[in-house]
Image (cartoon, rainbow, N blue to C red):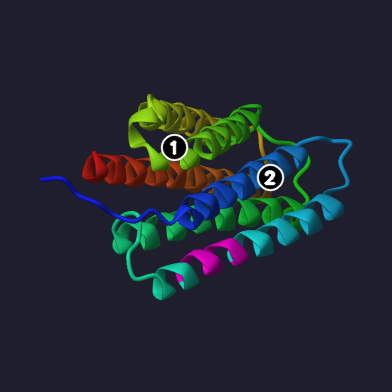
């Protein structure tokens, strides 16, 4: 049966905006691993970016509550908005820990985790506008799933190195906190991709 649903483009624009916040957040996280960066300044910029991301999520929620007909299921809109917010919160948490813990030496694979997060953020930013036409999403979901598996492998190598005897006990605890937060952020990107896939299936 032919289904007509009025299109409110504001939702797509807001999701695209939310994803762009993630690109900024992942970039700021990467800056924290640059020895020449001013970590306090980067952390402040991250807090500002996280607050801006919160505003976007609140705008999505307000739009859902004030719109009679939404472009796709309200539950999916809430889920996707919350998941995008969760990713940004985890990026902010990781930046904050790097600042507070004042970690100097990190296993090399931690930068691989940060790189995975940057790529996931860029792919998600490219995918959000395509929710208007889910057929254009292409390999977004499978690529994020592949990156998540790559992140898992990096995480396992980091943990193995941390407990290999080359780090002091306190350093192990600090680094482990950070890499676990990064791992959760990568997993959160996969949840976003899975929700996008669910929306695409329903709208196809």
**Mark 2 surroundings within 10 Å by alpha-carbon count, few (fewer than 14), some (14 through 19), many (20 or more):** many
Image mark count = 2
Q: Main secondary structure of the magenta part?
A: helix
Residue 133, percent from left and from top: 37, 37
Circle nearer the N terminus (1, 2): 2
Residue 162, percent from left and from top: 58, 36
Find disc 1 in the rendering and name its residue: 130
Q: Residue at x 78, y 41 (%)?
A: 104
Q: Residue at x 61, y 34 (%)?
A: 118
- Which label was assigned to residue 147? none
Residue 53, percent from left and from top: 61, 59
Residue 48 appears in the figure: yes
Picture layout, residue 102 above or below residue 201: below
- Which label was assigned to residue 24? 2
Distance CA(mark 1)–CA(mark 2)? 20 Å
- Residue bounds of the magenta highlight: 55-61
Residue 160, percent from left and from top: 50, 31
Check the picture and name the quadrant holding the N terminus: top left
Q: Residue at x 32, y 57 (%)?
A: 76
Q: Residue furthest left?
A: 1
Picture layout, residue 167 above or below residue 83: above
Labels 1 and 2 touching (C-beta < 8 A): no
Circle 1 SS class: helix
Camera-side residue of 53 and 159: 53
Circle 2 SS class: helix
């Amino acid at each position: 049966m032919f289904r007509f649903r009025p299109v409110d483009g504001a939702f797509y624009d807001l999701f695209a905006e939310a994803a762009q916040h993630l690109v900024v957040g992942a970039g700021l996280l990467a800056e924290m691993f640059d020895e020449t960066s001013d970590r306090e300044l980067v952390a402040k910029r991250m807090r500002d970016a996280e607050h801006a991301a919160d505003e976007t999520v609140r705008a999505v929620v307000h739009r859902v509550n004030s719109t009679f007909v939404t472009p796709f299921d309200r539950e999916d809109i809430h889920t996707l908005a919350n998941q995008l917010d969760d990713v940004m919160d985890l990026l902010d948490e990781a930046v904050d820990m790097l600042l507070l813990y004042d970690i100097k030496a990190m296993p090399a694979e931690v930068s691989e985790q940060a790189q995975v997060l940057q790529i996931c953020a860029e792919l998600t930013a490219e995918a959000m506008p395509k929710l208007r036409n889910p057929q254009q999403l292409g390999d977004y979901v499978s690529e994020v799933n592949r990156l998540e598996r790559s992140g898992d492998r990096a995480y396992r190598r980091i943990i193995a190195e941390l407990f290999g005897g080359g780090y002091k006990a306190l350093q192990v605890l600090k680094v482990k906190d950070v890499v676990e937060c990064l791992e959760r952020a990568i997993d959160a990107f996969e949840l976003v991709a899975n929700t996008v896939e669910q929306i695409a299936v329903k709208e196809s």
